Image (cartoon, helix red, strand yellow):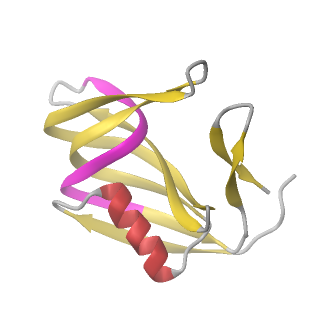
Amino acid sequence: MGARTTSRTEIVVLKRGQRVIEALTAYAKEMGISNASFNAIGAVEQITCGYYDLQTRTYKFKNYPEGVFEVVSATGNIMLKEGEPFIHLHAVFTNEDNEAFGGHVEEMRVAVTLEVILTVCDTALERRYDDETGLYLITP
């Protein structure tokens, strides 16, 4: 079940060359953010994304080292994992032919800009290891 929370919205603009997961983690630490959700659009490069294989309990990532890609939609959250802010990000990208791909983002670098709308919540949720899935899941 959910709980009633209050929230505030922040706009974070990442600049060319910034590593997205690294920059959002640093921002969360600097601002004391432990729970938030976010959406983002922009253009990125050097993407590593994929999916989680439940049978092998490993992520299957693919690298996209060349090219600039539009971020059609990126969504994620920030929760504490072992006491530190952890960024969980999924995104859909398009290439120069408007072909789409995406998945769970391990990392990507800003090619032009990334405009992040961050909703910070006053909750105290965190990720804890789940034996059934082998993942750190949000635990109320």
Residue 119 location, x and y as percent?
Answer: 56, 67
When the figure is inspected, residue 128 is found, relative to residue 54, above or below; the finding is below
Quadrant in the rendering for residue 49? top left
Q: Main secondary structure of the magenta part?
A: strand
* Residue sitting at x 52%, y 59%: 86
When the figure is inspected, residue 86 is found, relative to residue 99, above or below; the finding is below
Q: Is residue 119 magenta?
A: no
Quadrant in the rendering for residue 114? bottom left
Report whether 20 appears left or right of 2: left
When the figure is inspected, residue 94 is found, relative to residue 24, above or below; the finding is above
> Considering the image in quadrants, where does the C terminus appear?
bottom right
Name the foreground residue: 1 vs 128.
128
* Residue, far right: 1
Q: How many marks?
A: 0
| Residue range of the region highlighted in magenta in the rendering | 99-116
Report whether 135 appears left or right of 45: right
* Residue, far bottom: 31
Residue 62 location, x and y as percent?
Answer: 31, 28
* Residue sitting at x 23%, y 48%: 43
* Residue, far left: 66
Residue 64 location, x and y as percent?
Answer: 21, 32
Q: Is residue 102 magenta?
A: yes
Residue 116 location, x and y as percent?
Answer: 39, 62
* Residue, far top: 55
Quadrant in the rendering for residue 123? bottom right
Name the foreground residue: 129 vs 12.
129
* Residue sitting at x 23%, y 62%: 18
Name the foreground residue: 28 vs 69.
28
* Residue sitting at x 17%, y 24%: 97
Report whether 22 appears left or right of 121: left
